[in-house]
Amino acid sequence: MTETLAWIFPALTLISLIGVPAYAGIRRGRFYALFSAIILGFSSAGALAVYWRLGLWIPGPLLPWVQVLFVYAMCATSVHYLMLSHARMRPPLYRWAISTPGQVFLAANFIATFWLIVLLVVRVPLYLLEAHQALAWLAPLDALPYVMGIMAALTSARPKKETVQLRIGEAKPTEFKRLPVRRSTERVSPLQNNSPLRIVQITDPHLGPWQPVQRLRELVASLAKQDPDLVLLTGDFLTMESNATPGALAEALSPLAELPGRCFAIFGNHDHEAPEEVRSGLAANGICLLVDEAESVVTRTGPIQIIGADYVGKNRKEHLQTLLEAHPRTNDQPRLLMLHDPSAFHDLPKDNVDLVLSGHTHGGQVGLVSLGFDWTVLSRSRWPDHGHFALGRSHLYVHRGTGFYGFPLRIGVPGEASILEVHWTPQA
């Protein structure tokens, strides 16, 4: 059986590498064909390298079963990406039998490709020195990407519920910097007259295999029950599957229909792939979509000016300058900007807004947030990854996202389902 399985997995991998992009090119066009070829190519390299080495560290009686798991997982991966050429939301059985194992396997193999390259730096010298015992001891390290893949799937499955305290107006740093955030997992206190402004931010839900309609609806309902003053949705609602499923977003956001006049939304980058589906899903629940528009909203704590910036990829500085000039500050109202991509914060006119709410980064996706540290792989990049930042009188909060796009690679960075309690200090 082991000898037979030895060639089935490589053959299946080769068929997938050729067949899926070829079919995708015929069915969906050149872009998706190239996308699937790159994704499957990177992950298949790691999968094949690990598969050929299984006999070095898997006990003989277990080897055939592990090989069968590899074959099944590759079948699931291939079917998942093949069926994205006919993208739509699928029933639970399909998600659990195909999408979940296929995407976890893909994510683990993606990590494996780069992990094995790192291990080569150690293994090549040992091989040249004929240190066979040391090489044998290192062989089980091949499994680390699959452990990480499972851990990432668990981290990706559910966002973390938190209450976040934001103080706006106290700190006025002369250089862009991260500010400390007080987060609590305790139950949200009932609203009182002197309670701070309570905001629910929903960003990057990416309705799809890992964020089915029922799960997102339950999450939105639990947040809506906290009686927020505002619900601000900062974009990226859909995936390829939900783009092609009319009414899915409307159903997922249906609990927000119970909060009329309090819900506002903007487009993220992925929303421009199916703008009419996003528009209809928001409108069905009375959510006001702001596309380079502004609203003055009377809340329990007083009036607030809310500006919604559309997502643009080029000429952002000119775009934001024009937007903010078209909607100048209204009296002494707090001025809040919804801006999907937080890197555009650097393009804002200085001190023009008080608070910017963003998403887009998914919190950095890979980092040490689960261990209580702020560091992520984006910490040194141009993207503010997550949390509270400020420059002058302008503050920025980057939400870690309700979901993610594509395969599960949230490692040490859980999603976020938070209540923001905003304490405004009048600006001098």
Image: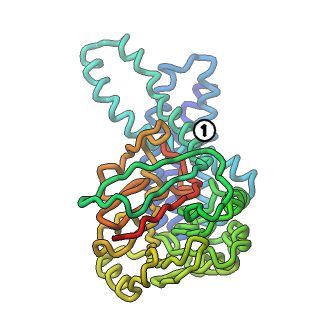
Nearer to us in this view, 297 or 115:
297
Colour scheme: rainbow
Q: Is 61 positioned to the left or the right of 173 in the image?
A: right
**Which quadrant of the figure has residue 27?**
bottom right
The total of numbered circles placed on residues is: 1
What residue do we see at 54% from left, 70% from top? 28
Residue situated furthest bottom in the rendering: 326
Residue 317 in the figure: left or right of residue 212: left
Image coords of residue 176 (percent x, y) = 28, 59
Q: State the residue at coordinates (51%, 22%).
A: 55
> Quadrant location of residue 155?
top right
The one nearer the camera, 200 or 314, is 200
Residue 370 at x, y percent in the picture? 50, 39
Which of these two is toward me, 194 or 231?
194
**Circle 1 sits in a helix, a strand or a loop, which is it?**
helix
Against 196, residue 407 (above or below) is: above
Q: Please state the horizontal and vertical placement of residue 303, each as a whole percent of the image.
A: 53, 78
**In the picture shown, does residue 152 fall above or below 296?**
above
Amino acid of disc 1: Val
Would you name the residue on which mark 1 appears? 71
Residue at 47 percent of width and 57 percent of height:
166
* Rendering quarter of residue 360: bottom left
Compare residues 330 and 102 and report the one nearer the observer: 330
Residue 365 appears in the picture as rendered: yes
